Image: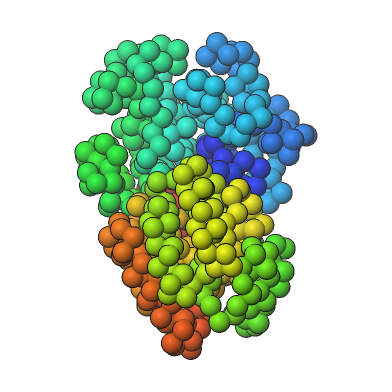
Amino acid sequence: MRILHTAAEIFPWVKVGGLGDVLAALPEALRAIELDARVLLPAYPALKRAFPQAKAVAGLEDLLGTGPATFLRDLTPSGVPIYLLDAPSLFDRPGGPYDDRGDSHLRFGAFSLAAAWFARHGDEDGWEPEILNCHDWQTALTPVYLKVWGGSRPRTVMTIHNLAYQGLYGPEVLPSLHLPPELMAMDGLEFYGRVNFLKGGLQVADALTTVSPTYAKEIQEPAFGEGLDGLLRHRSQALTGILNGVDHRVWNPATSPHLPHPFSLADLSGKARCKRELQREMGLEERRDLPLFVVVSRLVAQKGLDLMLAAVDRLVHEGGQLAVLGAGEAGLESGFGEAAGRHPGRVAVKVGYDEGLAHRFMGGGDALVVPSRFEPCGLTQLYALAYGALPVVRRTGGLADTVVEGETGFFFEAVDAHALGDALARACHLFFHDPLAWKRMGLQAMAQDFGWIPSAQRYRDLYRSL
Ligand code: ADP
């Protein structure tokens, strides 16, 4: 089966969040179970630098008035064919994948259109997909173009990694995207007077997926549906939740080049040393006897870190340490900075994005805090489990599907700092008073296998059903 995944991120070259990790791992896992999975991305500078030998395999004379566009093809180091849409006026920008100069609708509308064109024409070797799997709003107009154009087309799957990002623009963008005005309707792209890219994909794709079973249910409720719950209820027969996995070649405490001391289920001694090194690196007291809680996250409202900020004093009072790695909203960045100032040696923050430090946080941390308001799947708790750091999570979305209270981590329910504080206090209590139970939970966490193959098999079953 020939499958093309289209998205705006791919690890390690272009990554903002979990989407990039998925695009790196899922196609490879599908290939491991004998499907011909490939990926298509915009030719951002980082990707052009990574694939200087990429060969032109198809082209468009003009892409929505932005000039010519070329499809380049190469192979990733793990052997996945990668196509890059080279449209310099749209994607040759230094500022990351979402460098918005007021033309995001055009960038990702054009990308979606080009993907639809490619799906019907294929490359110079005649390769064309039977299944087109689009990820998130940046690719969501592809099924819409295919529907508008009519004729033969691949089956389409629209995967939601985060329903909160939908691609919303004024109605005036429709003509510039060469889409007919009739689409400005309830059963089209119209959303409270605006154009909603993701809604378009959700209306017309043959199948819809999201990245955990619980989130698939939650988004059909008003509280999590971001205004699209009615549509998702209407399409609930077409909607399934398939968990993301961990790429164990990247996230493995026995082999990660980022950890100062490797460790594994068979020999955990390196973990204590990772903790000491992390405490030193972050300027925390080098105390083996205190539980070290870590956060690795985008600092945005979704992630609930305002609750963590409000619970910092309580955590310190209970005897915990906290190290935060993250970047995002200025208020949260400075808030954690102030907390570190109040609790020297006990709380530390590193503002920024640092892949290697993320490994050291998971490796050195005793516990990872993920107080998300909603969480489609969440990858950091999976990485924490693999690195023997117990997740303290709000019971929502993929967090509810991957952590087991009292076995591999700690849950709290209400979106408030007291509920989080209680969970943190429970964790501290166990750490101080029942170290054997703590250790047993760590071993159980590390023994969990959230590898990609079972998830890839579920995607395969879905593709077959189409
Ligand atoms: P989301 O996609 O909503 O950001 P996920 O948990 O699915 O959340 O994925 C987050 C990914 O981004 C993980 O791979 C995590 O390690 C990484 N990450 C987030 N913030 C940072 C940071 N400041 N430094 C390094 N890695 C980060």
Q: Where is residue 134 in the image (x, y as percent from the top left)?
A: 46, 37
Q: Position of residue 33 (x, y in %)?
A: 55, 57
The reply to whether residue 423 is visible in this rendering is: yes
1 vs 418, left or right, is: right
Instruction: Please name whichever residue, 142 or 399, is drawn nearer the observer in this view of the structure.
Output: 399
Name of the residue lying farthest toward the right: 53
Which residue is depicted at the point 32% across and 25% down?
189
Instruction: Please name whichever residue, 22 or 388, is drawn nearer the observer in this view of the structure.
Output: 388
Q: Is 61 located above or below residue 399 in the figure?
A: above
Which residue is depicted at the point 60% across and 48% down?
352
198 vs 264, left or right, is: left
Q: Is 393 located above or below residue 135 in the figure?
A: below
Instruction: Please name whichever residue, 125 or 272, is drawn nearer the observer in this view of the structure.
Output: 272
Is the C terminus in the top left, top right, bottom left or bottom right quadrant? top left
Which residue is depicted at the point 39% across and 58% down?
310
Which residue is depicted at the point 40% across and 37% down?
165
Residue 426, by quadrant, is: bottom left
Q: How many labels does the image show?
A: 0
Q: Is 47 located above or below residue 58 in the figure?
A: below
Q: Position of residue 39 (x, y in %)?
A: 58, 40
140 vs 46, left or right, is: left
The reply to whether residue 29 is visible in this rendering is: no
Residue 253, by quadrant, is: bottom right
